[in-house]
Image (cartoon, rainbow, N blue to C red):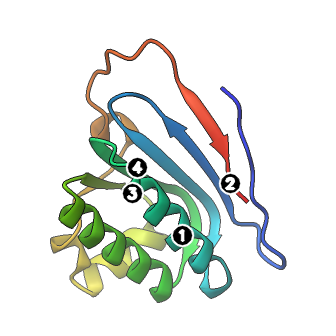
Amino acid sequence: MHETLAYLPGTPARTVITTTAAETVVAVSDELDRRSTDRLRDVLAEETALGPPRLVVDVSGLTFCSVSGLKVLVDAAREASLAGVAFVVVAAQRAVLRPLRVLGLDRELRVVECLADALAPSAAPSTLAAEVG
């Protein structure tokens, strides 16, 4: 797997995209704050436009998620739905789950606790990962 990292000035945000025939996984780690949400919005829009059967946003590596980060997830889920792309968020840590629950966004988003729960068995023999930045 080839991993590409995007470091934004002043934040340790990191995004890795992994694609198979069955799904695209966008993994975001460290801090998702106002300075890094624009880039994530762009990445999710680009991936949705490619029309994968399923778009999984793995935020299980986040240590902080701002309200603007949550808005990006909700907006991306709506866009994916309009495009006919299944959208799943992977989150198990308090930094994401608590605000999702408090704001009632866990009723708008499909949220699972681990990546394995978000992925169905894939017939694709190889995986392609790309760097964003």
Residue 11 in picture, x, y percent from top left? 77, 74
Q: CA distance from mark 3 to mark 4?
A: 4 Å
Query: What whole-number distance in Å separates the C-alpha atoms at marks 4 and 1?
Result: 13 Å
- What residue is disc 2 on? 132
Whether residue 91 is visible:
no
Q: Which mark is residue 49?
A: 3
Residue type at mark 2 is Val
Cβ atoms at labels 3 and 2 below 8 Å apart: no
Foreground tag (1 vs 3): 3
- Residue drawn at x 58%, y 79% is 38
Q: Which residue is mark 1?
A: 42
- Identify the image quadrant of the C terminus: bottom right
Which numbered tag is attached to residue 50?
4
Give the spatial CA distance, label 1 vs label 3. Answer: 11 Å
Screen quadrant of the N terminus: top right
Q: Nearer the viewer, mark 4 or mark 1?
A: 4
